[in-house]
Image: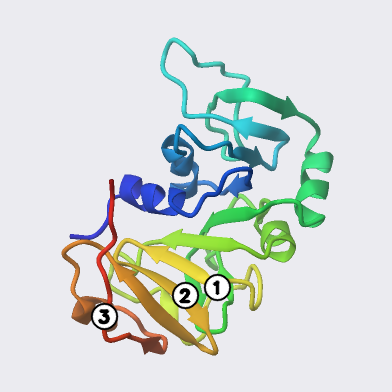
Amino acid sequence: MSLTREQMAQRVAQELQDGFYVNLGIGIPTLVANFVPNNMSVMLQSENGLLGMGEFPTEDTIDADMINAGKQTVTTVKGASIFSSAESFAMIRGGHVDLTVLGAFEVDVNGNIASWMIPNKLIKGMGGAMDLVAGAENIIVTMTHASKNGDSKLLSDCSLPLTGKGCIKKVLTDLAWLEIEEGAFILKERAPGVSVEEIIEKTQGKLIVPDDVPEMIFS
């Protein structure tokens, strides 16, 4: 079985460390906020000017003016701060974010990422992704392994306009956890019940498969 969006967010949350400043992109990455361990201090940043995002609000805690970069309503944690987007991007461009989690349309074996547009389709713009991939060294991309029509999103070369070049080293899909090294995807973990053969079939770029590929563990 492929991972659900919530399981993907839960797996990314396993990469968090105490004291991290973390930027979460729109889509699946925003769900990571719901899986931060209770005994861990992590400050989630939104590039529209919020540091210290909490879980998504319930109906009785919702504040329509408190939103993240994806225009979703959010909550704040103790110690949160609100500032201008200019200061927020200075934080990103200055390399002061420990982990960035982004969605993508495509990633290739050279660590290139295409995440901001599909030609001839209406788009909202680049957003903060270009700054994030340029200013962060620790980036995790979350996306489905293949498109709705079955085409692989893990490629030898991205076909869509690039957001950044040579900046991606870790990819979590609904099928697998992969790392990028020396022009290849390296299969590190597979989703529970997903076979290595299925991952190979749905990966267009060069894929290195170790002798033992463990299943992901969820507590």
In the visual, does 118 lie left or right of 153?
right
> Image height check: is 192 above or below 13?
below
Circle nearer the N terminus (2, 1): 1
Q: Secondary structure at mark 1?
A: loop
> Image height check: is 195 above or below 89?
below
* Residue at horizontal 44 percent and vertical 82 percent from the top: 185
Mark 3 to mark 1: distance in Å?
21 Å
- Tell me whether circle 3 and circle 2 mark residues in contact (CB < 8 Å): no
Q: Nearer the viewer, residue 88 or 15?
A: 15
Q: Whole-percent x and y of residue 23?
A: 62, 47
From the image, tell me which residue sits under label 2: 179
Badge 1 amino acid: Lys
Badge 2 amino acid: Glu
Q: Whole-percent x and y of residue 34?
A: 43, 35
- Tell me whether circle 2 and circle 1 mark residues in contact (CB < 8 Å): yes
Q: Whole-percent x and y of residue 118?
A: 52, 65
In the visual, does 109 lie left or right of 88?
left
Q: Residues within 10 Å of mark 2 (few under 14, many from 20)?
A: many
From the image, tell me which residue sits under label 1: 169
